[in-house]
């Protein structure tokens, strides 16, 4: 809502401009003293071309007046004059809600049909996968990529490495309710040397060649600060969304520098919940599509 001052400022400025446009066209169409008659030569010439006093055609003038009338009618029907809402009561929200209701009436039965199928069955239905692919392209590809292979901080959905589990029902819950993954930074507790030691040990879990002395020193610190989430063997905990450190899949990069950064500064990743935005039927179909990606 505008304040009283701005409410009237907008009204006066808007209506004043419309009145000024009307006055301008009437003033310019008026005959002037000493002006030659309509259709006569004005006396101005250039390169053999003479100027005639030809007024604007009536059809052009009437089009101009019609636009002014249209603008006044529009401002009566729709919002445009400060806080005045228009006699039709139109709002963007009502427009959006109406369009959503129309779309639900048209497409709702399609999604309801697949809502009766389990996610694993959807993953084998070509028609369902085609629809699910379009949903993925609209709502998921911005983060996970058009090929669903993810990127830095965004999981690859085409492999079998899952932070929270890859069962059909788990995938559906991830899309419905979202996920919040947070790893604290350990710089204060470990110090620079401790970070390097734990990094060496973490890299060794996936078979990387590292300094054995650093890795040995890092193991003790790992058991103290990291094993609670990632497990003593480093294979993670899907109940917490703690990644498996013993494979070769890295969410934020597996270089020494990237792993050091994760340990030193921590990581925070969030996947939004789509339950309220898409509805359960669409999420169910989308879960089937995502599940199918890791089954190829």
Image (cartoon, grey):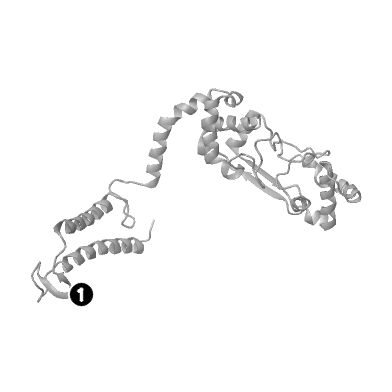
Please name the residue shown 23% across and 64% down the image: 21
- Left/right placement of residue 29 relative to residue 168 reads left
Q: Of 82 and 67, which appears nearest the observer?
A: 67
In which image quadrant can residue 246 be found? top right
In percent of width and height, residue 169 lies at 63, 29
Q: Is residue 252 left or right of residue 39?
A: right
The reply to whether residue 280 is in sight is: no
Residue at 69 percent across and 36 percent down: it is: 162
Depth order, front residue of 150/120: 150
Q: Residue furthest left?
A: 37
Residue 182 visible to an observer of this rendering: yes
- The local secondary structure at tag 1 comes to strand
The relative height of residue 287 versus residue 88 in the rendered view (above or below) is above
Query: Residue at label 1?
Result: 46
Image quarter (top left, top right, bottom left or bottom right) of the C terminus: top right
Q: Is residue 156 above or below residue 35?
A: above
In this picture, residue 227 sits left or right of residue 10: right
- Rendered view: 78 above or below 288: below
Residue 250: where, in percent of width, then height? 73, 44
Look at the picture and state if 217 lies above or below 56.
above
- The answer to which of 63 and 181 lies nearer the viewer is 63
Q: Position of residue 289 (x, y in %)?
A: 58, 31
Where residue 2 appears, as percent x and y from the top left, is: 38, 59
Seen at 40% across and 45% down, the residue is: 93
Q: Residue furthest right?
A: 213
Mark 1 burial class by Cα count in 10 Å: few <14, some 14-19, many 20+: few
Quarter of the picture holding the N terminus: bottom left
Picture mark count: 1
């Amino acid at each position: 809502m505008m304040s009283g001052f701005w409410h009237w400022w907008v009204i006066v400025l808007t209506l004043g401009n419309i009145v000024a446009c009307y006055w301008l066209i009437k003033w310019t169409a008026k005959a002037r003293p000493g002006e030659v008659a309509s259709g006569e030569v004005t006396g101005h010439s250039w390169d053999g071309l003479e100027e005639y006093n030809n007024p604007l055609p009536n059809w052009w003038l009437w089009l101009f007046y019609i636009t002014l009338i249209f603008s006044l009618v529009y401002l009566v029907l729709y919002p445009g004059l400060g806080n005045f809402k228009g006699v039709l009561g139109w709002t963007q929200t009502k427009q959006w809600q109406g369009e959503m209701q129309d779309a639900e009436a048209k497409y709702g039965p399609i999604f309801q049909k697949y809502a009766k199928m389990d996610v694993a069955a959807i993953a084998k239905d070509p028609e369902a996968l085609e629809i699910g692919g379009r949903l993925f392209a609209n709502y998921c590809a911005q983060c996970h990529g058009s090929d669903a292979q993810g990127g830095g901080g965004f999981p690859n959905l085409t492999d079998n490495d899952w932070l929270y589990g890859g069962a059909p029902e788990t995938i559906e819950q991830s899309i419905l309710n979202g996920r919040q993954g947070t790893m604290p930074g350990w710089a204060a507790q470990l110090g620079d040397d401790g970070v390097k030691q734990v990094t060496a040990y973490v890299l060794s879990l996936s078979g990387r060649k590292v300094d054995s002395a650093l890795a040995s020193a890092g193991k003790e610190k790992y058991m103290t600060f990291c094993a609670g989430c990632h497990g003593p063997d480093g294979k993670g905990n899907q109940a917490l969304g703690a990644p498996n450190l013993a494979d070769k899949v890295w969410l934020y990069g597996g270089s020494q520098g990237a792993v050091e950064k994760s340990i030193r500064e921590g990581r925070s990743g969030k996947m939004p919940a789509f339950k309220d935005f898409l509805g359960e039927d669409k999420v169910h179909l989308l879960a089937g599509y995502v599940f199918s990606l890791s089954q190829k």
